[in-house]
Image: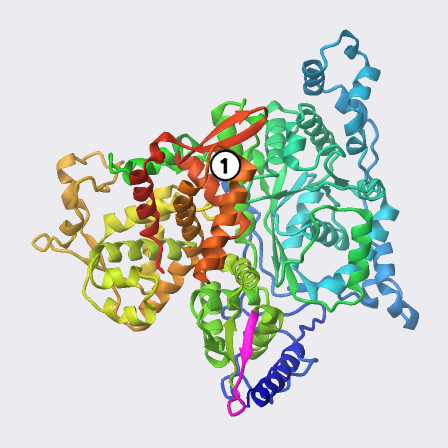
Amino acid sequence: MAFFLNLLLAGVLAEVCRELAMVQETNDGIHKDVGLEIQQNRPAFSLEMKIKKTRKIKPPSLGMFRPVVGQCCHRCTPNSLHKKLVQSSSLGFCNLLRINETQTRYRGWLVRRVCCALFAIGRKVNTSPVGNRMEGVCQSIRVKEALTAEHPAPELGASPGQINHLSPFLPLINTCILPSLLRFVAWVMLKMFASIFDSIQVNLNHLPALHRASQEGSQLVYVHVRQSLVDCALISLVLFCHNLTIPYTVYPLHIRSYTLRAILQKIGVVPLPASALTEQDAENDGLYSPVMTSLVRELLREGQAISVGLSVETGQGGAWLARIRQLIKEGSVTDVSLVPVGISYDNVPKTNIQVGLRSVLQWLWSLLWTTPGGSVRIHFAQPFSLKEMCESRRCNIHEWLPLQDLLLPVILNRSDAVFGGRRMRWLLPSEHKEAADPERDLCIMIILHLMYSATSCMAVMPTGLVSSLLLYRRRKGVRVSLLCRDVAWLMGEVLLRNRDVGFGGSLVEIVHYSLSLLAPHLIIAAAPSKKDPFIVPRPTLAATLHLYLQAQVVTHTFILEAVGACAVSAMLCEVARSGVGSRIRSDAVDWEEAKGDLEFDVVLCQSELTERALQLSHLLPPGFMPPCQLSQSFALDAVDSLVSCGILIMEENTRNAPVCDFWKKEGTLTWATTDDPYRSESDCEEQDLHSYKISQPKQCPEMLFFLCSMLAGHLRALCWTIAGLELLHTPLPEAEFVAQIHSHLYDTANKKKQHYESCSEEAARTAARTLIDLGVLSEARRDGVVFLSVSPLFQLAENRQKLHCFISQYLFN
């Protein structure tokens, strides 16, 4: 009997896979902006339904217009607002991989066969001669001072001596762009990416701004958030195909092959020095930073563009922005225009960490036997002036404080909270610590702002929508018909928040396409008598981490609502510590059983709710909130967003019914308007008359739990790390400490058989950095190696328990 059942399920799954494989996105060049087609008169999912391959994919929109993304910050760069990105109805998206004879000067049968090569040959490439670049770098004052400090010999005043000591950096200085080689490599990349992706969609409405900035003589600096090694290649390929200046690309990895290094340096790639295995090793070299700063100065003087990638976990790549800022401050460079770039993947391609010629050839050979999987959407944000951002002084960096000053008084019940922004000086490498604190904080503000801007203009892909729904709302499984309704709802919420989506077509096509890409990480089953398959995420580490990575862009979209929902959850659990509160906090109780207990009349004080949201905002990783926005304003917006989406209902409190007095405990901070000249301390208890009640519709608890789950992975990793501190024998080198924390997180998740999204290496690294900023871990440098140990204050189990309780209050299981 079991044999026949397995055979039947195998047949059903085979039929489902065939249906999913038929959903491939087809593009015909430029798509027009039309409304989203949702089929309501036919079943949401049917095994007998056949989707035609010739059906055109139509980009979704809100009404008849797409959201305009990528606008520059109106607070930091107000003068750049007059060059707004205009959404033209005549433009849309072009598929970079769909090249035909109309994009060449020739026509005919043979042209259609070689149109890709003809297209690459016809592209305009600005020559990039090295010229006097070597002399300019060697004669730089900072390079001479660095040479004198490293090699204090009298003969170093001569140029030959300098060149001898700079020999490891000479290949980097001689990096250039050969037009013929670049065209050949671009043709190879077009063929290669056609084997990796279904399409590479580029927003044509953003390109006129780049052309206009190039014609005005602005030096463009493209900045993206690192996701894969192909990020840099995609940016250069898009600019090449649209006749824009090819940037010099900062490549963050070590390249072992001499031949491959030589080829890449001839197409504008600036790799790490041959002797450096990591970026940190390169930055630790006393000559690397001065030489690279001088090289950037020479490139910008030549009118070249630069492409830089930023790492959210470590902040690597930010040193290049700090160098550009230093050049503008000293007057070596007049100004540059920063261009945040948002790159969205249906599936982030996997690439090797160690890049060699043999591994690259093997990878290219393997592409011949693979089928394309997923699409890419690229948005170039509006260029804005770096000098204007620095001189506007709209960001209150003087109010930045260490995280331990912001939260430790509240965690240890010593005093009231202190207002300010979180200072994250670890985003710049150690050699920049000698700079003045205001200047260092200004460079960090630039890094954080570009992280946020690049992430904000990333489109939400269909795999991101489905992954977030399966992880945060339907973790125990869902039928495809219900999943289609959830996708339609979530897509509308994303568009309402002015976030673009990277897909189009009918609702059924969108869901089928997403499931076909996520199929290796899902369990798809259907009974023979039913036409509605049941979808469950695979309870494995690889599957959970993949879905969690795809869902991150949705978390960025709903970050305000997620912070506010966690603050509400913390207050509800404090209201009901016994009874429903203990049931909700228990891992053994399903929220389906507990949500009925939330149908009680509870009033939440505005000041207390905003304070909880403020404290939680300090624990967010970088890139989630703009640094130019005050933390207090972010917390207020988080609470207001819950009112907008219908979770909370605001009501006025009369003075004879002080419902908020329940929250006026000893040590609770009372909010007041600081710029009110008539404010007095005696008025503090009468100012806040607002309170909130949870709306009673049945979908409200479900929405609340969905938002809380978005931050649960990060908060749970913090809690597990705190619990594992007593198992570590410190001090330990930072790399070994992170490795042991990573192992502890994996063992904890494996023991619970769930929550694998909290045990990634990135989660361990982020948790360790947060605990360092909190003062839980102390840093000590020995022989150039950073050692971490538990600080004396948190060697006490009582203080660790207080910290654990503080963070776990926001964690809704």
List x then y, in percent, for residue 369. Answer: 79, 67
Residue 75 visible in the snapshot: no
Left or right: where 145 falls relative to 178: left
List x then y, in percent, for residue 647. Answer: 31, 64
Quadrant hosting residue 434: top right
Q: Is residue 206 magenta?
A: no
Quadrant hosting residue 695: bottom left
Q: Main secondary structure of the magenta part?
A: loop
The span shown in magenta is 522-531
Left or right: where 443 falls relative to 655: right
The amino acid sitting under disc 1 is Met
From the viewer's perspective, is residue 326 above or below residue 469? Answer: above
From the viewer's perspective, is residue 80 above or below residue 692? Answer: above
**Total marks in image:** 1
Q: Secondary structure at mark 1?
A: helix
Judged from this view, the residue extending furthest toward the bottom is 529
Residue 508 visible in the snapshot: yes
Q: Residue at x 55, y 39 (%)?
A: 736
* Front residue of 129 and 406: 406
User: Which quadrant of the rendered structure holds the C terminus?
Assistant: bottom left
Quadrant hosting residue 811: bottom left
* Front residue of 806 and 157: 806
List x then y, in percent, for residue 388. Answer: 54, 35
Q: Residue at x 54, y 23 (%)?
A: 435
List x then y, in percent, for residue 552. Answer: 51, 57
Residue position marked by numbered label 1 in the rendering: 445
Q: Residue at x 72, y 20 (%)?
A: 140
